[in-house]
Image (cartoon, rainbow, N blue to C red):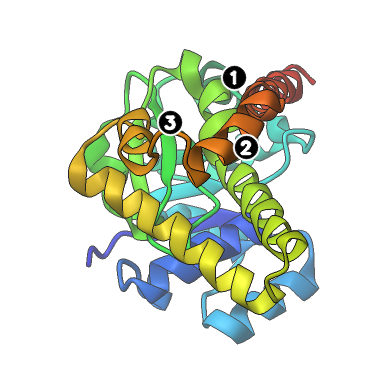
Amino acid sequence: MTQEKIHFIGGGQMAEAIIRASLSNNTLSVDQISVSDINETRLQFLNTKYGVDTKSSQEQSLATADLIVVAVRPQDDLTTLGQIVQQFATSTSAIVSIVAGVTNEQLAGYFGADRSIIRVIPNTLTDTGYGYSGVALNAHATRDQVEHFLLGFGKVQYLNEALMDIFTGFGVAGPNYIYYFIESFVDAGVLAGLPREQAWKVALENVMGSVAMLQQTGLHPRQLLDINNSPGGVGMHGLFELNNSDFAAGLQRSVLAAVKRTTELGVK
């Protein structure tokens, strides 16, 4: 565990998820974390539940922070926030931004052109240890500055910033598609006649087991489909109907729509 100080500007759901996972994984301790937010009720909640510092002034916390996590909305006043950071934070403090759609170039305009800036698209599976966060470093930032912090709430993929919107719509929104598939698969089992509890257990076991098979064998999904399905068999009849549906194209359109929306948010 490092002794770096982390200050969160904004204590919303994503900031809380990062704090919760980091504390649970023992990559950060409560005395390393401070949070500021305009919502006093939210600060009281975070202090009571996690024990993190929400009572120090933002100026005090910025002055001692090694990493400043900007966890506000893209429509919030980043200009004023940048002025506060430049006034009170040390020049060596790095900015970790989880602000959707705001580029490193834009962030440099707010927080300083010579500052280390790390743009992060955090994964939504923080409590599980699974999921990748997408990370784009500016020219002044290094992996060593931020990797220990990021690995506290999942895995990391470093990206060319031009890929960040795609990563958001595909990778970070990815669990949505999986949840939707599992719900639909369970409903299919119930429609066929299985009790819902049994269908739920079978669906989850099949999903986890299928992922394990792909990882253990290194085979392409199509190869496992070929192995699992005999000519004229049960599985092939099921796949025939699935191939006649709009499943694959619908999923692809969903990802493209999510990427498009991510880009739109960055323009606003």
Instruction: Give yes or no for contact between labels 1 and 3 (Cβ–Cβ under 8 Å).
Output: no
The residue that label 3 is drawn on is 117
Quarter of image, res 75? top right
The residue that label 2 is drawn on is 99
- Amino acid type at circle 2 is Val
Q: Secondary structure at mark 2?
A: loop
Assess disc 1: are there few (<14), some (14-19) or many (≥20) residues with their C-alpha within 10 Å of its C-alpha: few
- Up the image or down, 98 lies above or below 50; here it is above
Residue 236 in sight:
yes
Q: Residue 65's spot in the image, x, y percent? A: 41, 54
Q: Residue 96's spot in the image, x, y percent? A: 47, 41
- Distance (Cα) linking label 2 and label 3: 12 Å
Please tell me how many numbered marks the rendered image carries. Answer: 3
The residue that label 1 is drawn on is 106
Taking the view exactly as shown, the residue that stands out farthest to the front is 232
Identify the image quadrant of the C terminus. Answer: top right
Assess disc 3: are there few (<14), some (14-19) or many (≥20) residues with their C-alpha within 10 Å of its C-alpha: many
Front in this rendered view, residue 199 or 261? 199
